[in-house]
Each structure stands twice: as C-alpha cells, then as structure tokens.
Image (tube, rainbow, N blue to C red):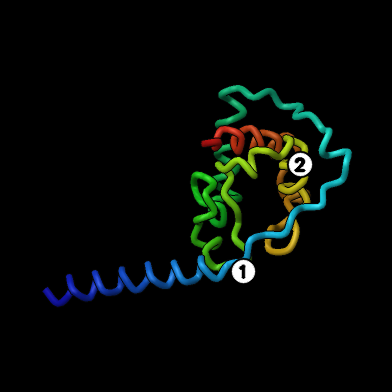
C-alpha cells in the first residue's frame, strides 16, 4: 500500500513539474528563412514509402524534443527554454516545404542543424512525414 501511495505521489509530482516547465517555455521567435527556400519544391514524391522513411528518421532524430506525433511534447523538448512547436497546427503547416526543409537542415538556437548529419533526401522525406501530422 505504501508503495502504491508513493508511486502515485511521485507520478503527480513529475506531472506537475512537467506542467510548470511547459508553462515557463517561451514561444519561439519567427524564423528568418531565405527566399530561395520559400520557393523550393520538395523533390521527393509524397508517397507511402517516403512518409514511412520520414517517420523513421523523425523518430530517430526529432521525437526526443518534438514528440512522437510532433506536438512538441518529447522528453527533451519539455526541458528546453523555447517550446519546440506543434507540427500538427495551422501555423506550422502553413510553412512551405522548402521552409520546413530549411528549419530542419540549418536549425537555430536549441534546434540543432542536421545539414551534416542527415542527407537532403532524408530531410525531404521528413518534410513529407511532418505534412502527414496535420490535424
């Protein structure tokens, strides 16, 4: 019985701490994205294979901050100063594919750059997956 009470208490404490941390996160500043990326078309066809490849890469490289479904609720993301963002929402989905590519490739602040870690074609597949997160 004591274990059950301690477990419930610890769970509530952890949940409360997470809520306080999320409330303290700043909203990110608007991205400054070069014009050529705003006009850039995704060269990777949005088909089941590319979405699945993008999902696998997202799970490996992004989910720790952005969460498994892109809600910004990953375990590392809860600890950042700036909220990682909700990829399912209208604001993020309003970005052009090239803008999503730019953000992923070059990063900024707490968002790491993946230009030397992930090939461009894989980033484009991740863009296809991020599009699939739309509400």
Question: Tag 1 or tag 2, which sits nearer the N-term?
Answer: 1
Residue 65 lies left or right of residue 112; in this view the side is left
Dot 2, how many residues are within 10 Å of its Cα: few (below 14), some (14-19), or many (20+)?
Answer: many
Q: Position of residue 51 (x, y in %)?
A: 58, 30
Q: Residue at x 64, y 44 (%)?
A: 91
On screen, residue 70 versus residue 45, left or right, reads left
Q: Secondary structure at mark 2?
A: helix
Which corner quadrant of the image does residue 122 belong to? top right
The image shows residue 41 at horizontal and vertical percentages of: 79, 29
Residue assigned mark 1: 81
Q: Residue 94 appears in which quarter of the rendering?
A: top right
In the image, 123: left or right of 134? right
| 63 left or right, relative to 5 | right
Residue 25 point in image, percent of width and height: 58, 67
Number of residues whose C-alpha sits closer than 10 Å to that of mark 1, classed few (under 14), some (14–19) or many (20 or more): some
Find residue 87 and report its horizontal and vertical position in percent. Answer: 59, 45
Residue drawn at point x = 64 percent, y = 38 percent: 93
Residue furthest out toward the front: 90
Between 87 and 112, the one lying in front of the other is: 87
Q: Quadrant of residue 121?
A: top right
Q: Residue at x 54, y 37 (%)?
A: 133
Residue in view at x 24 percent, y 69 percent: 8
Quarter of the figure that contains the N terminus: bottom left
Q: Which residue is mark 2?
A: 99
Q: Secondary structure at mark 1?
A: loop
């Amino acid at each position: 019985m004591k274990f059950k009470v301690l477990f419930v208490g610890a769970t509530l404490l952890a949940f409360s701490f997470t809520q306080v941390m999320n409330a303290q996160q700043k909203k990110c500043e608007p991205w400054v994205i070069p014009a050529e990326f705003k006009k850039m078309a995704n060269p990777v066809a949005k088909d089941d294979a590319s979405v699945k490849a993008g999902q696998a890469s997202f799970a490996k490289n992004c989910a720790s901050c952005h969460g498994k479904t892109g809600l910004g609720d990953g375990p590392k993301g809860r600890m950042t100063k700036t909220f990682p963002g909700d990829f399912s929402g209208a604001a993020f989905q309003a970005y052009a594919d090239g803008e999503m590519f730019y953000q992923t490739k070059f990063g900024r602040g707490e968002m790491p750059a993946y230009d030397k870690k992930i090939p461009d074609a894989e980033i484009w597949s991740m863009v296809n997956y991020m599009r699939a997160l739309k509400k």
